[in-house]
Amino acid sequence: MHRDFIDKIEENPVIAAVKDDEGLATALKTEATIIFILYGDICTIGNIVDRIKDAGKLAMVHIDLVVGLNNSKEVTLDYIKKNTRADGIITTRGNMIQHARDLGLYTVLRYFVIDNMALVNIEKQSKQGVCQPDVIEILPGVVVSKIIKKVNGISRVPVIAGGLISDRDDVMNALNGGAMAVSSTNPEVWKL
């Protein structure tokens, strides 16, 4: 686990998740210290990351959503490491975590908790022990605190709640339920 990444999340538990250039411009003006990049393509991702890094913030690239990088091959991670200044990656593919960590990238493994099978998958990943991400992000982030507590109980990896976080109550419910942070594409949440 990258303790410095965890420390940065704990220092500012609201993470700006951006899905276009307009959202990025807004996020760069906020106090958010970590930005999740949820858009772009192989030609633009370097510039997007540079804008974030030049603003003194951490840049996390969701490799599943960047056109041209959205495959399950390790060369995707090599490209991010060699051709951008990204601090880390977000993915739904657990097989990518170990190589990203080997490259020194921070890692977020994203799960869609829509049924009990998702919880089983989180537990399996936790028991494997070899490819542990720095944090798990569960979506939707407005899941009841009971689910966040359950994930915390089956995994030693810290949890971020993301998706559908739209106001202060959602943020507080997630944090009080055991999430260490929230990610949101809502600029109003970034200001909290």
Image (spheres, grey):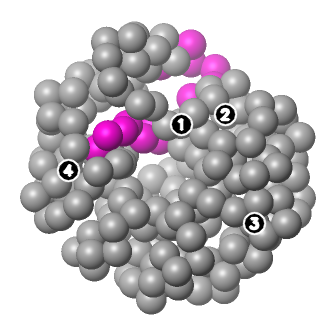
Q: Mark 3 is on which residue type?
A: Ile
Does residue 78 sit above or below 42 in this rendering? above
Give the secondary structure at mark 2: helix
Res. 45 mark: 3
Give the Cα distance between marks 1 and 3.
Answer: 20 Å
Quadrant showing the N terminus: top right
- Confirm or deny contact between disc 3 and disc 4 (CB under 8 A): no
- Residue 10 seen in the figure: no
Quadrant where the C terminus sits is: bottom left
Numbered tag placed on residue 97 in the rendering = 2
Q: Upstream in the sequence, badge 1 or badge 4? A: 1
Residue at the spot 52% in from the left edge and 18% down from the top edge:
125
At 67% across and 82% down in the image, what residue appears? Answer: 51
- For the record, the magenta segment spans 126-141
**Distance between the alpha carbons at the discs numbered 4 and 2:** 25 Å
Q: Position of residue 189 (x, y in %)?
A: 27, 70
Is 185 magenta? The answer is no
Q: Are marks 1 and 2 in contact (CB under 8 Å)?
A: yes
For the residues labelled 4 and 2, say whether their Cβ atoms are less than 8 Å apart: no
Instruction: Give the percent coordinates (x, y) of residue 79.
Output: 87, 52
**Among the 4 quarters of the image, the one containing residue 60:** bottom right
Determine the residue positioned at 23% across, 22% down. 150
Q: Earlier in the sequence, mark 1 or mark 3?
A: 3
Of the numbered discs 3 and 4, the one sitting upstream in the chain is: 3
Residues 1 and 165: in front is: 165
> Residue at horizontal 54%, vertical 43%?
108
Mark 3, secondary structure of its residue: helix
Find disc 1 in the rendering and name its residue: 109
Amino acid of disc 2:
Ile
- Residue under label 4, please give it: 175
